[in-house]
């Protein structure tokens, strides 16, 4: 253990680098070495680092008003709620501080919805390979035993089915009492950039409508233009009852939201849920700024075009690599799946001065900022290809 880390809980395996400053798609360490950030703080820094409009909004709001609590009206919160709901096709928003909290709110909406229907033990359908957070409830909804191990007993009330399998959902609906909704990622991020078949989300919508269930879509990683639409469910024209968002909404400032429409928007009432910091003036000012930049600069369209450029280039560059099983993505959410565990790729990419990560054991994940230039996209492809070629040949230092 490094001496400086003796007073930190050892919950992370950290790469041997730290950063002092950032600008756009780049980060610099203490020695002045520059790294291309293709991870964006795990899909957070959608506008890159030190974006001038975000920085100005933070500074101005810090000099004006940071926090009052939700005991009082917060005009910036009302404005952010209106804009988010317009972009998402929703009606009401609850603001919190993280994706896990947003998903907790969704779970509470589903359970309370069930109780209003006279269901004593409401159940939510979730999927294998999902990741919804690390609180006890969201961890229990997550489809990864490594995340859950050692924290039993888990929260009950979740029925697990395979991802991208409508028949399994229908079977649970026919054979299980008390189901009130489905919680699903439109693309599984932590699960390995798993993209369902076209029609999967619309099929889930049909099942929910037929059974009077809520369709709840976890857009924590996919939202905010990353996949080429404001929200990934919009690729199929689906309208969920609940959608959750966080990560990129604050570009690094902690903020999350649970959005709802129809009956789901009426479930939570005064006293049934809350958050001390959620939706404070600082978070909402930044969120509004992020949405403004994304909208004014047409970042959804940019993500779609740049993602296609990177995907096509990676497929060409890695066509001869026998260890590469698949290259998949939508917008700037891209995964390269290998035929073996490949955690070493993080260090190999770091030697190419590129920041990436590996998820699901065998998938190199790319989540670059949406402000990436064409030249930076080409540099990313070159560096990732070089790292994978070294990994495949065994030339690991």
Image: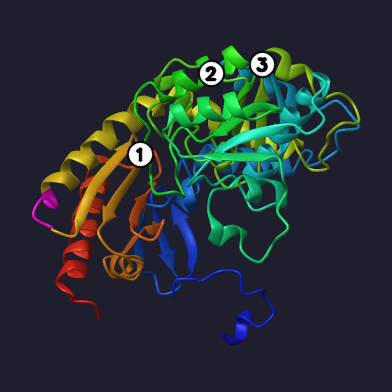
Most extreme residue toward the front is 175
Q: Main secondary structure of the magenta part?
A: loop
Picture coordinates of residue 102, whole percent (x, y): 67, 37
Q: Nearer the viewer, mark 2 or mark 3?
A: 2
Between 104 and 372, the residue placed more toward the observer is 104
Q: Residue, x 51% and y 41% (percent of image)?
A: 52
Q: Tell me where the magenta segment starts and ends, as one range.
A: 317-321
Please determine whether, in this image, residue 291 is positioned above or below residue 205: below
Q: Is residue 75 visible?
A: no
Q: Determine whether, in the image, residue 55 is placed left or right of residue 380.
A: right
Q: Is residue 181 visible?
A: yes
Q: Which mark is residue 394?
A: none
Q: Are marks 1 and 2 in contact (CB under 8 Å)?
A: no
Disc 1 crowd rating (10 Å Cα; few below 14, some 14-19, many 20+) is many
Q: Secondary structure at mark 2?
A: helix
- Which tag, 2 or 3, sits closer to the chain's start? 2
Between 302 and 193, the residue placed more toward the observer is 193
Q: Secondary structure at mark 3?
A: loop
How far is the residue under mark 2 from the one under mark 3?
A: 18 Å
- Which tag, 1 or 2, sits closer to the chain's start? 2
Q: Determine whether, in the image, residue 320 is placed left or right of residue 229.
A: left
Q: Secondary structure at mark 1?
A: loop
Please determine whether, in this image, residue 306 is positioned above or below residue 205: below
Picture coordinates of residue 73, whole percent (x, y): 85, 25
Magenta stretch encompasses residue 272: no
Q: Which mark is residue 207?
A: 2
**Residue identified by numbered label 1:** 332
**Residue identified by numbered label 3:** 261
Picture coordinates of residue 378, whole percent (x, y): 20, 47
How far is the residue under mark 1 from the one under mark 2?
A: 30 Å
């Amino acid at each position: 253990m490094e001496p400086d880390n003796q007073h930190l809980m050892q919950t992370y395996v950290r790469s041997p680098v730290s950063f002092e400053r950032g600008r756009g798609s780049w980060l610099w360490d203490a020695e002045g070495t520059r790294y291309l950030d293709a991870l964006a703080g795990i899909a957070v820094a959608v506008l890159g680092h030190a974006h001038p409009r975000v920085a100005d909004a933070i500074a101005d709001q810090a000099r004006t008003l940071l926090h009052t609590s939700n005991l009082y009206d917060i005009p910036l919160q009302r404005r952010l709620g209106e804009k988010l709901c317009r972009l998402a096709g929703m009606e009401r928003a609850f603001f919190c501080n993280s994706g896990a909290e947003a998903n907790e709110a969704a779970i509470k909406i589903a359970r309370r919805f069930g109780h209003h229907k006279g269901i004593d033990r409401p159940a939510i359908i979730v999927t294998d390979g999902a990741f919804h957070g690390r609180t006890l409830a969201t961890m229990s909804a997550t489809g990864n035993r490594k995340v859950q191990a050692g924290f039993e007993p888990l929260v009950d009330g979740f029925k697990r089915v395979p991802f991208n399998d409508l028949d399994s959902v229908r079977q649970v609906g026919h054979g299980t009492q008390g189901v009130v909704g489905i919680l699903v990622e439109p693309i599984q991020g932590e699960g390995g950039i798993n993209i369902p078949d076209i029609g999967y989300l619309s099929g889930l919508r049909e099942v929910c409508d037929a059974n009077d269930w809520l369709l709840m879509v976890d857009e924590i990683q996919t939202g905010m233009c990353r996949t080429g639409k404001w929200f990934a469910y919009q690729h199929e024209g689906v309208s969920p009852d609940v959608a959750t968002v966080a990560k990129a909404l604050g570009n690094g400032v902690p903020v999350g939201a649970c959005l709802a429409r129809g009956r789901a928007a009426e479930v939570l009432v005064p006293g049934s849920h809350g958050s001390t910091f959620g939706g404070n003036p600082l978070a909402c000012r930044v969120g509004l700024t992020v949405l403004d930049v994304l909208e004014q600069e047409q970042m959804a369209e940019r993500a779609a075009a740049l993602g296609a450029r990177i995907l096509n280039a990676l497929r060409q560059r890695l066509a001869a690599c026998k260890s590469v099983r698949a290259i998949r993505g939508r917008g700037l959410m891209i995964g390269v799946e290998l035929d073996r565990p490949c955690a070493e790729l993080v260090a190999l990419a770091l030697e190419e001065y590129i920041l990436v990560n590996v998820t699901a054991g065998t998938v190199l994940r790319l989540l670059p900022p949406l402000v990436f230039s064409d030249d930076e996209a080409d540099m990313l492809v070159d560096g990732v290809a070089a790292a994978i070629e070294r990994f495949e040949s065994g030339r690991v230092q």
